[in-house]
Structure formats: structure tokens, C-alpha cells
Amino acid sequence: MLRLLTHQLIIGVKKTLACHASTVLPLADGRVLVAWFGGSHESALDVGIWLAEKTQSGFSEARPVAASLEPHWNPVLFQALDGRILLFYKVGRLIQDWRTCVIESTDGGRTWSPERELVPGDTSGGRGPVRNKPIRLASGRVLCPASVERGLWRCFIDISDDECKTLRKSNLIEAAGTGHLDEGLKYWQGLASQTKLRGEVFDRSQLPAEYQHGRGIIQPTLWQDEKGVHALMRSGEGAIYRSDSFDDGESWCEAYPISMPNNNSGIDLTQLPDGTLLMCYNPINQNFGARSPISLAASRDGGESWEKLCDLEAEKGEFSYPAIVSRGNHIWLTYTYKRENVAYWEFEWA
């Protein structure tokens, strides 16, 4: 079913010690853009957004397209109907407080506009796509898969009817069975605040395990079919979670677990012309478990059941945060390779 066309590592000349969270966008002229964040280590002040492009002669040398004195995170490439290429990314020292910025290109990614905040003054923890690509619905509406990591992790969908010039949020989507954590978290936050007021150091060992790392769901990936719009989400619950919308993304049901495992790391999927869903993921059901192997699975029934197709990497190391897109039956896939490079694959679905 899958025919391999090419496979390589993107970064030839290393410009940073570490890299992570790639995004991929094929263009009509045959070039392919890939971006990621890179610096001395994740969350370091020197982390910026890097970009390389693939032509017939191979990948260009990576170049920085966004940087400042704050950490940058999770770039996402998307092309508007008028041809503009949008590059979204997060900026901020704390994930729960990061903001979303965007730059635009009108010449196929060769030059970029000055940075602007996507939703000026937003304090909710980042708007627009959090890690995975937006999708354009049959109606023309664009949905950006988003999430917040303050307290209990939750997802939402940013809705745009003007090609991401303005956005409005859907309801917050919670993972079934985790909402009760909010009251407990408020108690522990209050205890920490009281301790600080008394001049004491809060002992984080008192904090229950479920609050140490965040529970819930983040980083949705989206598709549309004849039934509605659907999201699969990374979770801290050991499984991939799903939510559905039957009103063009306006409202979403409580997220529920599916049969596929999740290691609390990123997933992504793409939909092929025959309706098949291809998902890239780590098949591990342990919270913050190993990020190897990284695998491809297919669903031919709208995400109700999945068949593992292959492992792309299975050795010891980190292979994570995939980005997968398709045009017709042509598929492009990237992911983090041991935090030191970006792996690139092209396939044909037959």
C-alpha cells in the first residue's frame, strides 16, 4: 500500500546543538519547506525557528527565520488560498504562558514579513495551531488545532472564516474522567501560595503525581469526513483520545479514549483521497514513555479501527513529534531524529 519514494536526514550542516518539532509543507512548484525549532536545548533562550527547502538538487542549508531573546517553539506551516505561506510558532519562557506569533511569505518561503502576534494581547496560553497543521473544511473554513497546558491540559479549536486573519475559540475539550482534577489542583495551588506568603519553600514532593506533569489532552490533529470533523489528541492517560464536531468545528464533545496507545508525545495524521487516514505515532502506552519506535498506522473506517503498517525507526533513541501531509496519494512526513536532526520521508499510496 505504501511505496517509499525517498528517505533522508534534512540537516547536513548543523547550526544548533538540538532541534525538535518539525513541520512540512509541499508547494505547487515542487519545492518542499520544512521548519523546526533549534538551539542549545529545548526552552533555552537561544532557540529560534529554522527553515530548509527541498528542491530537485536536495535540501538547502538551514537558515533562521525567527529568533529573539525568548525561547521559540512548535512551528507550523500553512498555505492560504491566495498563496501566502503562514508560519506560526510559539514564543515564551513558560509553556503555559506562551504567545503565538506568525510571519508570512508571498514568494514561496524565500523572504518573510516582520513578526506579529496572531491574537494581540492573548493571555490564554497561545492561540492558533499549537503543533499540528490547520485544515480547510469543505465550507472553506479553516480550523486550527490548539491546546492549553495550564493546570489540567485541554484542547480547543481556533476557528477562522478569513484565512487566519481573525480567530475565535471553540469550547474547551476535556478528556473524559479528568475534569475532577481541577478542584484538587486548585487546592494544591492554594497551598503553594500560602506557603510562599509565609516565606517558606513549597515541597513539590507533596504534589500528587497526576499534577507533577499535567494530565489531560493536548496537540490535536484534525480531519473531516461525511459525518463531521474529528480530532485525535495526545494525552497523559496512556491512550490517544478523540473528539468530534458535527457543526463545522463550532462545538466539540468530551474527548474519549480510542484503542491506540499514546506515550504523552505528539501524533499527526493525514487523510487520503479514498478516505484512508494515515497516522504517525509512538506505539507506547506509558505516560511520558519511550519515544521509540515511531510508526505508521492506517484506518479505513474513519478512525474507528487502526492497522499498524510499519515502524519507521525502532532503535534506541528519540523519534518523535511527526508532521504528515498529503496531496492526492503523495505523502510527506518529517519527525525529530534523536533531537539532533530531522528525518524526511516521501511515500506514494497505491
Image (cartoon, rainbow, N blue to C red):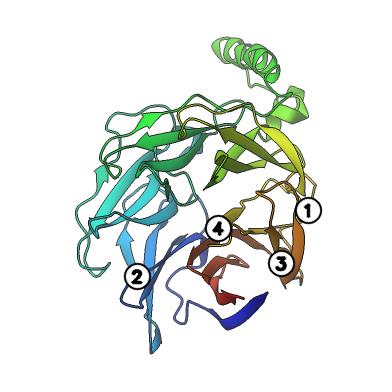
What is the distance, in whole Å, between disc 2 and disc 4 at their CAs?
16 Å
At label 2, the amino acid type is: Leu
Of labels 1 and 4, earlier in sequence is 4
Q: In this rendering, is residue 233 above or below 322?
A: above
What is the distance, in whole Å, between disc 1 and disc 4 at their CAs?
21 Å
Q: Residue at x 68, y 48 (%)?
A: 303
Which residue is labeled 3 in the image?
Answer: 317
Of labels 4 and 3, earlier in sequence is 4
Residue 137 image position (x, y, % from top left): 42, 45
Q: Is residue 89 left or right of residue 1?
A: left
At label 4, the amino acid type is: Thr
Q: Element at badge 1?
A: loop
Of labels 1 and 2, earlier in sequence is 2
Q: In this rendering, is residue 259 above or below 256?
A: below
Which quadrant would residue 348 be assigned to in this image?
bottom right
What is the distance, in whole Å, between disc 1 and disc 3 at their CAs?
14 Å
Which residue is labeled 2 in the image?
Answer: 27
Q: Element at badge 3?
A: loop
